[in-house]
Image (cartoon, grey):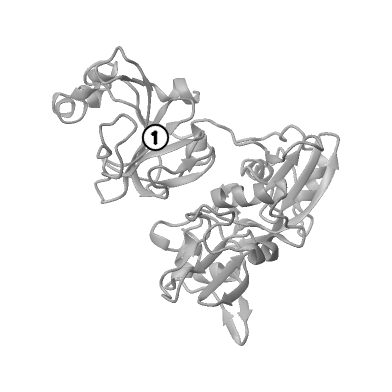
């Protein structure tokens, strides 16, 4: 996890962004300060509370730390471990539309979607236009009903019509949510729409600050854009880190099975069933073709570098190598294999996925949410990388992911 200030961010600015509404103060060497820096954005600390003897820090984007450990969403839309319904209801908040008040309900599709965000932002606004009803949260997340089917709620973020705005948004809503400075032709507004589609949230613009290192534009979820020079387009700050750990959102994880010949892959029965094919891909027969990374089923997965989706599930595309998309199925009936042809020519495979949030042919930028990990012979992610090699029977060579994404 990152523990130092990103280049260009001063300690004074970090303290201002961290917030002064509670007794907490930013300390880059403290446990919460380090955890906050590791988020990749800079949301304001809004409250510190004691629950059952544990200290909870809650931020404007809905991120919650219990001690220095982040409180994660529970699998299947349930309440997180150690978090009761009363506390979740308080975090959710409430909003009025006319005479009606909306509150948290775990058995409602909006409540279930909110629980699955991986953070717990407060409900700020509910509005209905024609048949669409919009629930907007403090971090800019919008859950909306696209039609009169009350069960058909979704989190805004996809753009399937090729237009400027994602599905469910128009310019009036963009202006309302961004703030009065929204300009669809402006570089900041266009980046806001792009990052919003990637992160599935459209936070309000809070203002900017000019420093010797550039102009910083800050948003309600802690996102920051930086324009280094007046005539340059803004970029996300800090820039996404393309690394192995960025696939699961940062932090070290154990390797359950390494790359190459392993005791499991060399077992005659396992070799015959799973690994006899590997000799066609430039590595020894009966080699494990990637790394098995220990992580709970349902962990969010992100693209570590830009590329195009070539497989999103089981049987949902030809695959970059032309051999199809049926490998590495999730035995519990999940999405199966996620595969990308990265812009640098590397084929990236995320195996045993339980959910696919991309479709074949879709472009993925570094940091885009693409799905969730699953389970097959235990909870883990199978991570595999291949490069083109005309000297192998398959035309591809399997390489250790650490040689591509770092060790």
Q: In terms of secondary structure, where does tag 1 sit?
A: strand
Q: Residues within 10 Å of mark 1 (few under 14, many from 20)?
A: some
Report the residue marked by disc 1.
293
- Horizontal side of 383 relative to 98 (left or right) equals left
Q: What count of labels does the image hold?
A: 1
Q: Compared to 97, does 218 lie above or below? A: above
Give the residue displayed 67% in from the left and 63% down from the top.
177
- Viewer-proximal residue among 22 and 286: 286
| One can see residue 165 in this view | yes
Give above or below for 273 relative to 287. Answer: below
For the residue pair 219 and 262, the one nearer the viewer reads as: 219
In this view, the residue farthest toward the bottom is: 99
From the viewer's perspective, is residue 381 above or below residue 121? Answer: above
Q: Quadrant of residue 78?
A: bottom left
Q: Residue 276: x percent and y percent? A: 18, 23
In the image, 317: left or right of 234? left
Residue 112: x and y, percent? 45, 66
**Looking at the image, can residue 67 be seen?**
no
Residue 269: percent from left, percent from top: 13, 28
């Amino acid at each position: 996890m990152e523990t130092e200030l990103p280049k260009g961010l001063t300690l004074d600015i970090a303290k201002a962004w961290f917030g002064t509404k509670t007794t907490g103060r930013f300390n880059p060497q403290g446990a919460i300060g380090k955890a906050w820096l590791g988020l990749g954005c800079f949301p304001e600390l809004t409250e510190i509370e004691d629950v059952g003897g544990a200290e909870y820090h809650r931020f404007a984007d809905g991120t919650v730390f219990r001690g220095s450990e982040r409180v994660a969403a529970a699998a299947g839309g349930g309440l997180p471990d150690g978090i009761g319904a009363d506390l979740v209801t308080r975090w959710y908040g409430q909003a009025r539309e006319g005479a009606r008040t909306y509150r948290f309900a775990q058995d409602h599709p909006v409540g279930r979607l909110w629980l699955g965000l991986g953070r717990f932002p407060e409900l700020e606004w509910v509005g209905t236009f024609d048949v669409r009803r919009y629930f907007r949260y403090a971090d800019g997340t919008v859950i909306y009903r696209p039609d009169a089917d009350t069960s058909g709620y979704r989190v805004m973020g996809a753009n399937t019509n090729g237009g400027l705005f994602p599905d469910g948004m128009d310019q009036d809503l963009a202006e309302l949510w961004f703030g009065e400075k929204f300009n669809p032709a402006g570089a900041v507004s266009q980046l806001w729409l792009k990052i919003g589609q990637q992160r599935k949230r459209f936070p309000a613009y809070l203002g900017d600050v000019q420093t010797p290192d550039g102009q910083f534009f800050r948003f309600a979820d802690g996102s920051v854009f930086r324009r280094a020079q007046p005539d340059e387009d803004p970029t996300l700050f800090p820039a996404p880190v393309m690394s192995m750990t960025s696939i699961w959102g940062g932090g070290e994880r154990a390797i359950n099975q390494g790359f190459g010949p392993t005791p499991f892959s060399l077992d005659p029965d396992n070799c015959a069933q799973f690994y006899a094919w590997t000799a066609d891909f430039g590595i020894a027969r009966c080699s494990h073709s990637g790394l098995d990374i220990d992580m709970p089923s349902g962990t969010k997965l992100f693209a570590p570098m830009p590329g195009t989706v070539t497989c999103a599930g089981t049987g949902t595309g030809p695959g970059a190598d032309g051999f199809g998309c049926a490998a590495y199925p999730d035995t519990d009936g999940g999405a199966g294999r996620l595969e990308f042809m990265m812009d640098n020519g590397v084929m990236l495979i995320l195996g045993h996925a339980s959910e696919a949030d991309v479709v074949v042919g879709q472009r993925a930028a570094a940091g885009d949410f693409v799905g969730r990990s699953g389970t097959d012979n235990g909870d883990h992610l199978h991570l595999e990388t291949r490069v083109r090699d005309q000297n192998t029977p398959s035309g591809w060579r399997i390489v250790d992911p650490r040689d591509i994404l770092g060790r």
